[in-house]
Amino acid sequence: QVLLAESGGGLVQAGGSLRLSCAVSGRSSSRYIMGWFRQAPGKEREFLASITWIDGITYYVDSVKGRFTISRDNAKNTVYLQMNSLKPEDTAVYYCAARYRSVSSYSYWGQGTQVTVSS
């Protein structure tokens, strides 16, 4: 069992930055790949980025590449999503998730944190 808790969301003006955190607790995190997703009102959940716990390999979708950065702090068992140059279309609930390296689907999800970008 893995428990995930996001924090760091809020209201920011366009062009601003936010850093989201995802605290991970439970079973050893070294076996997991951590991901960030978001869901805007009326839209499907969207994958943004992922990182492997054991070696820090990252992956981004094109829409956030160069603006968002995923990272992890093994000592703190925390994954971060640094978001820069935010746009109103980045407004969404942001979710942290975890999956086993051998499985393609994410099994564990946090409760989400709201990010609102004003124009």
Image (cartoon, grey):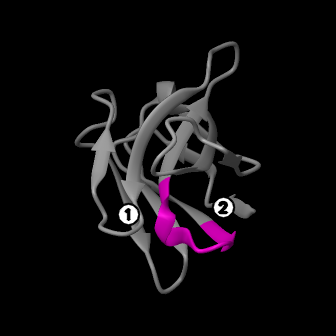
From the viewer's side, name the closer residue of 106 and 93: 106
Q: Does 72 appear above or below 43?
A: below
Mark 1: few/some/many CA within 10 Å (<14, 14-19, 20+): many
Residue 100 picture location, percent across and down: 53, 52
Q: Specify the farthest residue to the front.
A: 102
Outermost residue, top direction? 42
- In the rendered image, which residue does mark 2 sit on? 7
Query: Is 60 part of what is drawn in magenta?
Result: no
Residue in the picture at 27% in, 57% down: 57
Q: CA distance from mark 2 to mark 1?
A: 15 Å
Q: Is residue 77 left or right of residue 111?
A: left
Check disc 1 and give the amino acid type. Answer: Ser
Instruction: Inspect this view and state whether residue 27 appears.
Output: yes
Quadrant of the image for the N terminus?
Answer: bottom right
Quick one: label 2 or label 1, which is nearer the N terminus?
A: 2
40 sits to left or right of 12: right
Q: Kindly identify the amino acid type of the residue bearing the numbered disc 2.
A: Ser
Above-or-below relation of 117 to 77: above
Residue 53 placed where, x, y %? 42, 66
- SS under mark 2: strand
Say if mark 2 contacts mark 1, CB within 8 Å: no
Q: Which residues are magenta?
A: 23-33
**Residue shown at 40% from the left, 43% from the top:** 49
Numbered marks: total: 2
Q: Is residue 113 visible?
A: no
Q: Nearer the viewer, mark 2 or mark 1?
A: 1
* Residue 14 in which image quadrant: top left
Circle number at residue 46? none
The magenta stretch spans residue 29:
yes
Residue appearing at x 49%, y 42% in the figure: 13
Say which residue label 1 marks.
Answer: 71
Residue sitting at x 37%, y 63%? 71
